[in-house]
Image (cartoon, rainbow, N blue to C red):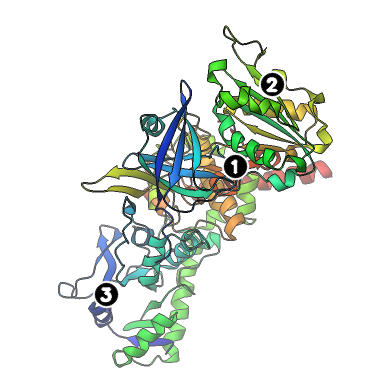
């Protein structure tokens, strides 16, 4: 069974929550947080129109975790299966990016891998992309095409549930009694809704469209003044990197526990002034403008060269989350325009 | 579960050697087999306190123990300096690429070192000496602030000077009573006629400011940027290209380095900082 119909979400989520912890979107003001699903307390679960605010990396690569123990190594707690409902296409792409880093041959991060294997990823279409969304600028779409176990699309009187992986398809098969057949009309409706979301996204991002591949734009913009200019409006709150679903810098530190020594692994941020500093005091990125440049170069040029994919999914969390006035979309657009202007100058010079 | 990359191998400090007022060498015996190539680095953990990257200064041929020479530079190195025999420590690694010694074969190897930068160079030097016949010559130019600041004094002032195929010159920034050698920063003992540049590689390791000026001199002499090998010191934390601290442009110094040719990294700003 590839795609099935269900009229209410609750039976679906109840069935999942029976066998594993399930995380769902919880509306807080205008945003969605992520909370544990409670089958008893929930009357009808909510389907989030856009991404939840917390990035999915929190569940795969927690803010702080025990990485090693001295002197007697212990095996980390085994991870129990868990499910996340309400992921979006951008979240799935962020997992693809994190997989490149943490599931890299010869350098697998055992903690990430254990959680990743145990995760059931349930995504859904974005019905109303948000004002800061710009996934389409980076070749994304407001609905998932792959990378999910199950995907949910809201249609008239119910939901279409698509199995995307063997795990997802098995789930649909095992719970076949819960689902109905999918008439062609509903598939057509889903296509129409997706198109509407895509159109809305294009409206939102009409001022941010780029004229060349983003990697090329950013790499060619290495010497641009935009980074130093942005540094004047950045307050170094580091929110952009913490809330980013793909940023993955971390910090290792050692600590004493009652009867053992521990090595801990904790999120870090390349926006922090001491991030690249060595013990002797030298610091190649002590200027904020250099750190802003490095962050963008890493996302769009260096990561692309190393892993063949850029390290930004256009979710817009950094735009929502930051305290100062740095907007990644305007920086990209500015670099784009500078590249265009350079091109025009070159043409003029040649003629 | 896959092997835990973050778990160090237990090891023990079995001896310490005072090298200079601020530099000590630690002889460390790992509990298990721990092999490395010359120029690769390890992450040394002082349990409960912290971890820092060091390039072993001993020959990789000696498998049962390694030596790590450490300058007191920050909190962890300060605490390590207080450790004595019997201190239990942790070792992760080895990480990075090391010196491409095979590529040096058939060439003159021009080795320029300063201060605690002689630590990785000692490991390289011992490796080169082990197979001295493979190289046209090994020419060393080492500097320190004062004669007292030279590390490995016994061998440096003694046996190493007499090795066949090795030519060595030393200098100090500031002489004291007994010093009869050259005085001046290390660039003052570099000379374009020292070596047949077309058939040579240069290896540089030392404090950033020294590496900067040595590199400038070598380029002036006519060394190709791809023939200048630099051992870069950055904030290597995880050791395997994930945590992001040691990034130098597109490179992870821990994984793609720590040894780079000048050609690889010259386009990035602040490489010496």
Chain letter behind tag 3: A
Chain letter behind tag 2: B
Q: Which residue is mark 2?
A: B187
Residue B186 location, quadrant: top right
Residue at position x 19%, y 75% in the image = A39
Q: Are marks 3 and 1 on the same chain?
A: no
Q: Between marks 3 and 1, how big is the CA–CA gap?
A: 48 Å
Tag of residue A20: 3
In the image, which is nearer the foreground, mark 3 or mark 2?
A: 2
Q: Which residue is mark 1?
A: B39
* Front residue (pair A284, A47): A284
* Front residue (pair A99, A4): A99
Compared to A5, does B133 lie above or below? Answer: above
Instruction: Find numbered disc 1 in the image and state the secondary structure of the residue it sits on.
Output: loop
Instruction: Find numbered disc 3 in the image and state the secondary structure of the residue it sits on.
Output: loop
Q: Between marks 2 and 1, how big is the CA–CA gap?
A: 23 Å
Chain letter behind tag 1: B
In the image, which is nearer the foreground, mark 2 or mark 1?
A: 1
Image location (x, y in percent) of residue B249: 59, 43
Q: Between marks 3 and 2, how big is the CA–CA gap?
A: 66 Å
Residue A6 location, quadrant: bottom left
């Amino acid at each position: 069974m590839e795609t099935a119909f269900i009229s209410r979400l609750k039976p679906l989520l109840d069935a999942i929550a029976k066998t594993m912890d399930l995380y769902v979107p919880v509306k807080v003001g205008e945003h969605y947080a992520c909370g544990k699903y409670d089958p008893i307390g929930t009357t009808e679960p909510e389907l989030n129109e856009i991404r939840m605010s917390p990035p999915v990396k929190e569940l795969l690569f927690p803010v702080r975790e025990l990485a090693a123990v001295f002197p007697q190594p212990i095996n980390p707690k085994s991870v129990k299966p868990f499910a996340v409902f309400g992921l979006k296409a951008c979240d799935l792409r962020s997992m693809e990016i994190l997989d490149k880093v943490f599931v890299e041959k010869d350098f697998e991060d055992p903690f990430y891998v254990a959680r990743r294997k145990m995760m059931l990823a349930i995504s859904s279409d974005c019905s109303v992309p948000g004002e800061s969304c710009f996934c389409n600028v980076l070749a994304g779409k407001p609905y998932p095409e792959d990378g999910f176990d199950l995907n949910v699309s809201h249609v008239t009187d119910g939901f279409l549930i698509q199995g995307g992986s063997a795990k997802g398809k098995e789930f649909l098969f095992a719970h076949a009694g819960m689902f109905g057949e999918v008439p062609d009309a509903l598939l057509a409706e889903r296509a129409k809704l997706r198109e509407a979301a895509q159109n809305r996204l294009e409206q939102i991002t009409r001022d941010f469209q780029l004229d060349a591949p983003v990697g090329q734009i950013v790499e060619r913009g290495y010497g641009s003044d935009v980074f130093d200019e942005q540094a004047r409006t950045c307050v170094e709150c580091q929110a952009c990197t913490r809330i980013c679903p793909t940023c993955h810098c971390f910090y290792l530190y050692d600590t004493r526990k009652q009867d053992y020594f521990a090595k801990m692994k904790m999120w870090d941020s390349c926006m922090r002034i001491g991030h690249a500093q060595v013990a002797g005091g030298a610091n190649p990125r002590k200027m904020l403008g250099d750190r802003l440049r490095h962050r963008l170069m890493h996302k769009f040029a260096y990561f692309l060269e190393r892993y063949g994919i850029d390290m930004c999914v256009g979710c817009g969390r950094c735009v929502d989350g930051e305290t100062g006035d740095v907007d990644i979309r305007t920086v990209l657009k500015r670099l784009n325009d500078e590249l265009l202007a350079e091109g025009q100058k070159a043409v003029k010079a040649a003629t | 579960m896959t092997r835990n990359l973050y778990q160090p191998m237990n090891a023990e400090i079995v001896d310490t050697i005072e090298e200079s007022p601020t530099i000590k060498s630690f002889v460390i015996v790992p509990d298990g087999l721990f092999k490395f190539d010359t120029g690769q680095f390890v992450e040394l953990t002082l349990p409960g306190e912290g971890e820092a990257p060091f390039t072993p200064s001993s020959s990789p041929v000696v498998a049962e123990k390694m030596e790590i020479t450490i300058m007191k530079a920050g909190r962890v190195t300060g605490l390590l300096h207080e450790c004595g025999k019997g201190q239990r420590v942790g070792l992760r690694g080895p990480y990075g690429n090391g010196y491409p010694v095979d590529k040096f074969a058939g060439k003159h190897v021009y080795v320029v070192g300063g201060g605690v930068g002689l630590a990785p160079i000692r490991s390289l030097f011992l490796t080169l000496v082990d197979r001295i016949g493979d190289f046209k010559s090994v020419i060393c130019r080492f500097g320190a602030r004062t004669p007292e600041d030279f590390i490995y004094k016994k061998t440096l002032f003694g046996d190493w000077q007499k090795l066949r195929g090795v030519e060595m010159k030393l200098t100090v920034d500031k002489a004291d009573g007994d010093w009869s050698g050259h005085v001046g920063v290390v660039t003052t003992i570099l000379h374009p006629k020292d070596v047949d540049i077309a058939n040579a590689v240069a290896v540089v390791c030392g404090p950033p400011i020294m590496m900067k000026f040595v590199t400038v001199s070598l380029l002036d002499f006519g060394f190709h940027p791809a023939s200048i090998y630099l051992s870069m010191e950055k904030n290597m934390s995880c050791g395997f290209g994930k945590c992001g601290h040691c990034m130098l442009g597109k490179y992870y110094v821990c994984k793609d380095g720590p040894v780079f040719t000048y050609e690889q990294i010259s386009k990035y700003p602040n490489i010496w900082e």
